[in-house]
Image (spheres, helix red, strand yellow):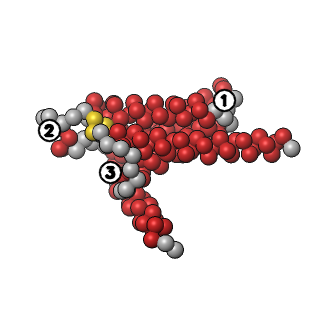
Amino acid sequence: MDEGFWAVLDQVGWAFEAVLAALANPLIAGGVVVGAGALGWGAWRVARSYRWRPVPSVLAGISLGVVLGVTFSRTLPAWASEPGQELCHLSGFSLHGSNELLNALLFVPLVFCAVLATRRPLAVLGSAVALSAAIEIVQPLTGRGLCETQDFFNNSAGAVVAAALAAGVVALRDRAAAR
């Protein structure tokens, strides 16, 4: 195997360790569990009203709970609250590092399941990008994280990939049903 494969595998390992470290914090773990449970139940109710597919709807709701639980259960680093710090740290897209990889993967389950539930990839993608932007703006205002354009770009890139994959699954399913 080439070195690129091992580098990616190493990043995945670091990302998995970062997830476990984050969930060791009771505030984050509690936010994720409560948010996922409440939004999963809410998604089931909405799916019944709009005649969406119930299982992917519930999984999308749970994924939304995880996204919100992880992003708003953190505390602001001490250095970020010092006077003179900018509201939003400007940087570009990058997958170098475990946090960057986690941000790229954060919206994937949510978007993938939401597209399978609603069968509306563009609407789901637009909503996910808007949600990512809103999270980045609200985090520093609430003291629950940093606004970083790189997080927004990484979240959005993961959402684009997930929406495209889910749209492909929906198209294949429709094609099979037509036969």
Distance from disc 1 to disc 2, alpha carbons, whole Å, reads 48 Å
Element under disc 3:
loop
Q: Tell me if residue 101 comes above or below residue 66 in the rendering.
A: below
Tell me the residue that label 3 is attached to: 25
In depth, the one of 58 and 156 nearer the eye is 156
Residue closest to the far bottom: 1
Crowd tier of the residue under label 3, counting other residues whose Cα lies within 10 Å: few below 14, some 14–19, many 20 or above: few
Residue 92 position in % (x across, y down): 36, 44
Sooner in the amino-acid sequence: mark 3 or mark 2: 3
Tell me the residue that label 1 is attached to: 48
Would you say the residues marked 1 and 2 are in contact, meaning their CB atoms lie under 8 Å apart? no
Quadrant of the rendered image containing residue 73: top left
Distance from disc 1 to disc 3, alpha carbons, whole Å, reads 35 Å
Residue closest to the far top: 49
Tell me the residue that label 2 is attached to: 82
Element under disc 1:
helix
